[in-house]
Amino acid sequence: MIERPWGITAFSSASVQAPPNLARLRFRVSRVQQTPAQSFAAASEAVSDVRRALREHRVPDGSVQRSQLTLASAWSYGNERKFLGYQCQASFVVESRELDGVQQLLVDIVAAGANEIQSMSFDVIDKPALRSEARKGAVAAARRKAQLYADAAGVRLGAVLHIDDVDPEKLGEGAYRSHSSARSESSGEDLAPGHVVVSAAVILGFAIAHD
């Protein structure tokens, strides 16, 4: 029961798709040796070899993020815990715009010493512009929905009184669970193969115009 009726509320979402123009690689260099000094030396050598491989692929240093070397005791766990040595590792996040060369880049960094490939994902460089376009689409869709309700109810749609930006990652959760079916409006784009999909969602509140 609506205790304080005031107008029309409409929720909608929209998605924009674009071909990827950026590859993002996450990987680690990890070495286990019997002493900390040996572990640091082995990991440092592998890190240098990986950096050399990246430069050979013309990946700018500014597109490479690397953590400091970390050290921890390494153990194996079976019937009894066994000390293996000291594990030294460094984590990398590398971005490359040369999508055609990503496969060979992975092959070469593994050959250079990267022994833990965590993920490879594709993205777009100018995501904020795509997000803005998706938000405009979500607003337009919400307005169309509200207009449909107004027409069906025989009233005239008034001015926008409320705008609530919705995180598209939270659709179907918490306060927006009741609106989760609205994702179907853009499900075709969400499943577009070979494209990066950027989504946005909004709740608009409209007054009912009184002549």
Image (cartoon, rainbow, N blue to C red):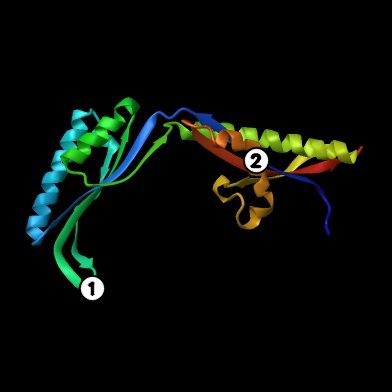
- Percent position (x, y) of residue 178? 69, 53
According to the image, label 2 marks what residue?
184
In the rendered view of the protein, which quadrant contains the C terminus? top right
Q: Nearer the viewer, residue 157 or 211?
A: 157
Residue under pointer 1: 79
The local secondary structure at tag 1 comes to loop
Q: CA distance from mark 1 to mark 2?
A: 51 Å
Compared across the picture, whether 12 is left or right of 50 comes to right
Q: Position of residue 69 (x, y in %)?
A: 19, 53
- Which numbered marker is on residue 136? none
- Which of the two discs, 1 and 2, sits closer to the camera? 1
| Front in this rendered view, residue 80 or 187 | 80
Q: Crowdedness of circle 2 by 10 Å Cα count: few (<14), some, many (20+)?
A: few
| Residue at 38% in and 32% down | 22
Q: Quadrant of the N terminus?
A: bottom right
Task: Please name the amino acid that badge 1 sits on.
Answer: Asn
| Residue most extreme to the front | 79
Q: Report if residue 156 is visible in the image.
A: no
Q: In the figure, is residue 32 to the left or right of 139? A: left
Question: Which residue is rendered at x = 62% and y = 58% of the image?
Answer: 174
Secondary structure of the residue carrying tag 2 is helix
Is residue 111 at least partly visible in the picture? yes
Residue 14 picture location, percent across and down: 62, 36
First reached walking from the N terminus: tag 1 or tag 2: 1
Quarter of the image for residue 168 reads: top right
Residue at 20% x, 53% y is 89
68 or 185: nearer the viewer = 185
Q: Residue at x 86, y 36 (%)?
A: 151
Q: Nearer the viewer, residue 21 or 133?
A: 21
In this view, 143 is above or below 40: above
Q: Is residue 7 left or right of residue 189?
A: right
Residue type beneath disc 2: Ser
